[in-house]
Amino acid sequence: MTSLEWSPAPVGIDASRWVSRSGCRPTLVVAHTIASCQRLLDVIGYVEGDPRVQVVFTVAPDVFNHQVARFLDRLGALVLPWYQAVREHFDLGIAAAHGGLHQLHAPLLLLAHGAGRSKRVRPGPSDAPVLADPPVYGLDAQRLTHDGRVLPTALALSHDRELEVLRRQCPEAVEAAVVVGDPCVDRLVASLPRRPDYRRAMGLGEHQQLVVVSSTWGRDGAFGRWPDLLPQLMKQLPADRYRVAALLHPAIWDGHGHRQIRAWLRGCLDAGLLLPDPTEDWRGPVVAADHVVGDHGSVTAYAAAIGRRTLLLPAQGPVPATGTAQHLLATHAPRLDPRQPLISQLALTGEVDPETVMAALTARPGNAGVLLRRTMYRLLRLAEPDQRQQTDPVPMPRPHHWATERGLAG
């Protein structure tokens, strides 16, 4: 390794020679993917402004981590290479995914990067036995332990229901669990009064309706399973009355490449499709939306929880964990059939009550920031500041960062 490959500051044996402010508690943000990084950026703000804390980032091993380093560079974050991060000691580590965590030397706060933990562990090889009740991903011993050691010092849960699942699947991790609610839900709720501002920022006319199409990654997501949906919407919805925005999971962009995604959607972009870059905050468009068409991904659940008219696409794959917001939607949300005329289906209603979905997403509404900050300062072994923890609205959409001209912007 050369000196250029190893950062001399602000952590490590010689760091005191180079830093201007010494004695800070080093905190490592472990970014696996764009999606997990976006969740961590919400949370790290609870301690980042403290003069006693020094925050650094690292990009962890993950098949979908291609764009993370560039994203962090644009944010002005100080990034340590992974091989250095796993050799240093930190007073706190924060992650929202699982790969490589056993290599870290830090008390670890582990969060979910989406709307709770609803997905089932995918089946193994084709000759593996099929389980009648597959484990819930992220609450299983395979993800939470290594060589008999529980990895997180604090495991942040959104709901008491997750604690019960954890008790069945990985009882050794129960002592680390803390139910904090969902910080993303709280920020969405805090943003609702600013809905007219989000709509203006997106260039929506007063009488235009915004249809947001949300897709998670994988072959059972909307983008993979229904490739003609966006072209059909652009063709069938009158442009003077409707705008359409597509929120594609960052892993879709990483799995296929940004150029290819824009090439596939070039006709839609020419027709006016709004296509945010995956590093843009997706929550502003969801707050601004009149209709959300989605799959089993987190965005659909969040949209339903804040009262957006939500239509679910027909899906394959495992049924979400019982009692989760995704399970409620799979059971009660109205279905949109992409093979039928679409405009009339936007008015479909089901038995989805936003308050019920909200209650399934978070057991501590409005308190995630307070509880997460308290947990982080406990792990840092620092007294918590006296200032009251605020929940900020999400950022305004920035359409000039979206691909809207022949798929070449972004």
Image (cartoon, rainbow, N blue to C red):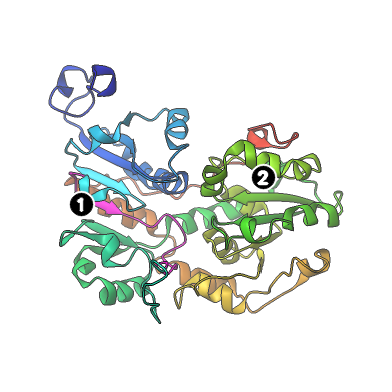
Range shown magenta: 104-122
Residue situated in front as seen by the camera: 294 or 261: 261
Quadrant of the snapshot with the N terminus: top left
User: In percent of the image, x 67 and y 40: which residue is there?
Assistant: 262
Q: Main secondary structure of the magenta part?
A: loop
Residue ranking furthest to the front: 127
Total labels drawn: 2
Residue situated in front as seen by the camera: 123 or 284: 123
Indicate the amino acid at tag 2.
Asp
Per the image, label 2 sits on a secondary structure element best described as helix
Q: Is residue 357 above or below residue 19?
A: below
User: In percent of the image, x 42 and y 69: which residue is there?
Assistant: 126
User: Residue 112 in magenta?
Assistant: yes
Alpha carbons under labels 1 and 2: distance apart: 37 Å
Q: Is residue 194 visible?
A: no
Residue ranking furthest to the bottom: 132
Per the image, label 1 sits on a secondary structure element best described as helix
173 sits to left or right of 345: left
Measuring from the top left, give residue 311's x and y in whole percent: 67, 67
Measuring from the top left, give residue 396's x and y in whole percent: 60, 41
User: In percent of the image, x 80 and y 49: which residue is there?
Assistant: 206
Measuring from the top left, give residue 161's x and y in whole percent: 37, 75
Q: Is residue 218 above or below residue 363?
A: above
Tag 2 residue: 197
Question: How many residues crowd around disc 2 within 10 Å: few (fewer than 14), some, or many (20 or more)?
Answer: some
Q: Is residue 371 visible?
A: yes
Mark toward the start of the polypeptide (1 vs 2):
2
Measuring from the top left, give residue 205's x and y in whole percent: 80, 46
Quadrant of the snapshot with the C terminus: top right
